[in-house]
Amino acid sequence: MDQNPVDILLVEDNINDAELTIRELRKHRLANNLVHLKDGEEALSFIFGSGTAGKLSHTLPKLVLLDIQMPKVNGIEVLQQLKSHEHTRATPVVILTSSKEDPDIRRCYELGVNSYIVKPVNFEQFTEAIRNLGLYWLLLNQPPT
């Protein structure tokens, strides 16, 4: 198992949203150990290695920021895999998406998401939301050991 720590695993297929998120986290020194992946399949492979039933391939991230609508494997499927495995169940997952659809929100909470945030359209609101996310989940939240 690779022991390089990952603070944030950002799973986002929209390159503009990903770059803005990373830039804002770096601005507040919250992205030192950030990994950006472009789809759910990459995320599952990153966390679980060759198969979701296999061993974990890395130390777990402190936070997973996850979009819903992505190619190959969507965010809800990734969330379901993460929350159904004993070793990844406690990893905080924040859905960061443009979907305000009640069925999406309801399903994510049923699966155990820690937070569901709709991406603000306004630039200033988006950067403030990202800053607050990073500060809370990386500095204030106390995860289980």
Image (cartoon, grey):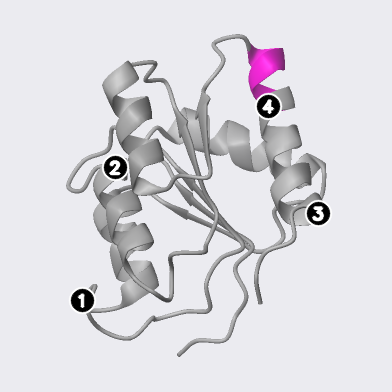
- Density class for disc 1 (Cα within 10 Å; few <14, some 14-19, many ≥20) is few
Instruction: Answer with mark 1 or mark 2, whichever residue precedes in sequence.
Output: 1
Q: Whole-percent x and y of residue 13?
A: 36, 38
Instruction: Return the mark for residue 76.
Output: 2
**Which residue occupies 75% across, 51% down?**
30
Label 1, on which residue? 51
The region drawn magenta spans 123-127
**Are the residues flagged by discs 1 and 2 in contact, CB closer than 8 Å?**
no
Left/right of residue 143 with respect to residue 41 in the rendered view: right
Instruction: Answer with mark 3 or mark 1, whichever residue precedes in sequence.
Output: 1
Q: Whole-percent x and y of residue 64?
A: 51, 53
Instruction: Answer with mark 4 or mark 2, whichever residue precedes in sequence.
Output: 2
Q: Mark 1 and mark 2: span between their CA atoms?
A: 18 Å
Q: Amino acid at mark 4?
A: Ala
Q: Outermost residue toward the left?
A: 72
Q: Main secondary structure of the magenta part?
A: helix
**Are the residues flagged by discs 1 and 4 in contact, CB closer than 8 Å?**
no
Q: Secondary structure at mark 3?
A: helix
Left/right of residue 38 with respect to residue 77 in the rendered view: right
Q: Outermost residue toward the bottom?
A: 1
**Which residue occupies 56% across, 65% down?**
61
Q: Mark 3 and mark 2: span between their CA atoms?
A: 26 Å
Q: Whole-percent x and y of residue 16?
A: 49, 29
Q: Secondary structure at mark 4?
A: helix
Q: Amino acid at mark 3?
A: Leu
Instruction: Return the mark for residue 139.
Output: 3
Is residue 68 something that shows in the picture? no
**Which residue occupies 74% across, 61% down?**
142
**Are the residues flagged by discs 3 and 2 in contact, CB closer than 8 Å?**
no
Is residue 111 something that shows in the picture? yes
Label 4, on which residue? 129
